[in-house]
Every structure is written in C-alpha cells, then in structure tokens.
Image: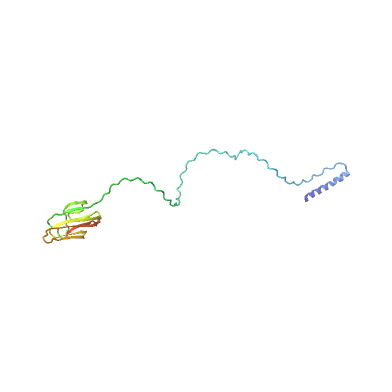
Amino acid sequence: MVCFCIAMGAMLSLALPDLVTMETCTSAGTPGLHGFPGLPGRDGRDGETGEKGVPGVVSGPGQIPEGGQKGEPGVKGAVGKLGRSGVRGDKGSPGSEGPRGEPGESGSAGSLFHSAFSVARGTASPPEKASPIRFTSVITDVNKDYNTETGRFRCRVPGTYYFVYHASSEERLCLVFKLDGTSLASFCDLTYGGTKRQVSSGGLATYLKGTVSSLASCLLYSH
C-alpha cells in the first residue's frame, strides 16, 4: 500500500504543468512519460479436472517388449552335498500284525548219541582180590566204550547210566562198583552149610558226565 501511494503522487505532480500549459498555449503538448508497471496480480483459481487421456504408445529407448512364450526346462543340475542328519523322531505306534507265514519244510530227525555195553566172563579161575574184573567176551558194545583189556567203561556221552551184574561162584562172592577210584556200592554174598554155589545180582544207577579232557570211568572190582 505504501508503494502505491508514492506512484500516484508522482503522476499528479507531472500532470499539473500540463494543465497550466493548456491554459496558456493552445498547441498540443508533448506526451507524458509511461507509468510504472503495476504489481503482479493474484493467481487464478484451479480449473476443473479434465478427462483421462488415451495411453500413449511406447517407442524409442526404454520400450517394454512383449512377453515371449515359455521356454523348455533346463538341464538337471548336479546333486548337492548331503545335508546333516535331522533330529531323531519319536517312536511310532506298533503296526498291525502281519499275515501268517507259510509253513517251513520238514526237518530231518536229529541224531541221538547212545552208549551201552554187555559183556561176560566165564572161567574157573577167580579174579584176584581188590583188582578190576575183566570181562573178555563182548556181547554188545555201542561206541566201543568198554575196554576188555582193563575192564574199564569210559563215559563219552553224559547221562544217567544203570549198571547191572549177574554172577555165580563156589566161594565167597563180593563185588564193588567204583567211579574214578571212588566206591559207589558194594555187594557181598557168602556160602552157608552145604551150599556149593553162590548166585548174586545187583544194580546201580548213577549220573556220569564225560568231558574231552577227563572221562568218567566205572569198574567192577572183586572184594
């Protein structure tokens, strides 16, 4: 507002001489000087929004190409390194029972080990006292466990054995069963009065356990 008043004052001062001249001289005066330019006016109001235009065609550098067709799958890559083992999972629930299998083939009967012997002795000479009785006539000897030279039976098949003897003599008849030098049982019969022959029988059941390094042996001693 201050600037505007100063400009108007200058214009009035310049106009006064013209009025005086007109009164004294009828000829036209010289044109006055141009005034100072006015101040810029305020911006006008925004106009209404126009209609949306049609998209332009992209051309020149930076043009976006159209998408092509999908290509063929590439070659399979190499197998990667084996990863670390994962944490062990929880134990699962038992599964259902499977179907029953087919019967197997019949097996062959197993072989059983046996040991048995039956021997006899017939002589008019009695055996020596406290010595093994040697039976020289072999009736049965499975596995050859009885030795006629020593009168000894050697056990190679563990098990319970039953030993039985039958004997007759015209004198006193006493016998002892021994196992590895240990007496197991003894039998003794004597003749009385006019009896000329004594008959005796006896038996013994015992468990024998034979090993490779030490075999049990059983003898019948005269006593």
Where is 51 relative to 191, above or below?
Answer: above
Give whichever of 200, 42 is nearer the camera.
Answer: 200
Q: Position of residue 3 (x, y in %)?
A: 78, 50
Where is 121 relative to 101, above or below?
Answer: below
Could you tell whether 21 is left or right of 50 in the image? right
Instruction: Please tell me which residue is depicted at 83% across the width and 46% down the height of the picture.
Output: 15
Instruction: Please tell me which residue is depicted at 86% across the width and 45% down the height of the picture.
Output: 19
Could you tell whether 103 is left or right of 57 in the image? left
Q: Position of residue 122 (x, y in %)?
A: 14, 54
Q: Where is residue 66, by image quadrant?
A: top right
Instruction: Please tell me which residue is depicted at 80% across the width and 48% down the height of the picture.
Output: 8
Q: Position of residue 151 (x, y in %)?
A: 18, 56
Q: Residue furthest left?
A: 194
Could you tell whether 62 is left or right of 99 in the image? right
Q: Is residue 223 visible?
A: no
Q: Is residue 19 visible?
A: yes
Q: Position of residue 155 (x, y in %)?
A: 23, 55
Give whichever of 189, 186 is nearer the camera.
Answer: 189
Q: Residue furthest right?
A: 24
